[in-house]
Amino acid sequence: MNKAIIMRSLASALAVFAYVLLIVLFLSNAGDRFGESEELLIPVFMLLLFIISATITGLLVLAKPIHLYITGFKRDAFILLFGTLGWLMLLLIVVALVLFRTTQ
């Protein structure tokens, strides 16, 4: 197995994790910055943020595997894709364990 592909999958997963952290930090401070409001623009903002976030994380996870697949490196594409998903699942488990320990 190519070590560079595994490291690339880790980098992609960490980039997604960092992006998620930035969005969470922004949203956790949004009430302080924008005040409490029940305007129509809040759901519009949240839906646009969701769409943009889905696009960014989709690109981080899928862009390189799709490129590898199209250029004929099918095995590397699958290793990269499932490696990234594996790292993301590991990060999810770590976050869940931290949450579990801090809530008891």
Image (cartoon, helix red, strand yellow):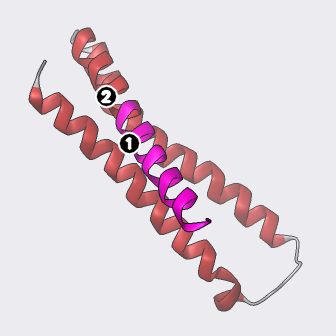
Q: Which residues are magenta?
A: 86-104
Q: CA distance from mark 1 to mark 2?
A: 13 Å
Residue designated by label 2: 83
Q: Amino acid at mark 2?
A: Gly
* Residue 72 or residue 2, whichever sits in front: 2
Residue found at the far front of this picture: 104
Label 1 Cα neighbours within 10 Å, binned few <14 / some 14-19 / many ≥20: many
Q: Sequence order check: which comes first, mark 1 or mark 2?
A: 1
Q: Residue at x 57, y 52 (%)?
A: 52
Label 2 Cα neighbours within 10 Å, binned few <14 / some 14-19 / many ≥20: many
Report helix, strand or loop for mark 1. helix
Quadrant of the image occupied by residue 45: bottom right
- Return the x and y of residue 91 as percentages of the image width and height: 41, 47
Q: Residue at x 41, y 32 (%)?
A: 85
Residue designated by label 1: 60
Is residue 89 inside the magenta stretch?
Answer: yes
Q: Amino acid at mark 1?
A: Leu
**Residue 101 vs residue 29: left or right?**
left
Q: Residue at x 39, y 60 (%)?
A: 18
Magenta span: chief secondary structure: helix
Identify whether 103 is placed above or below 54.
Answer: below
Q: Residue at x 28, y 26 (%)?
A: 80
- Return the x and y of residue 19 as percentages of the image width and height: 43, 59
- Return the x and y of residue 67 as percentages of the image width and height: 29, 24
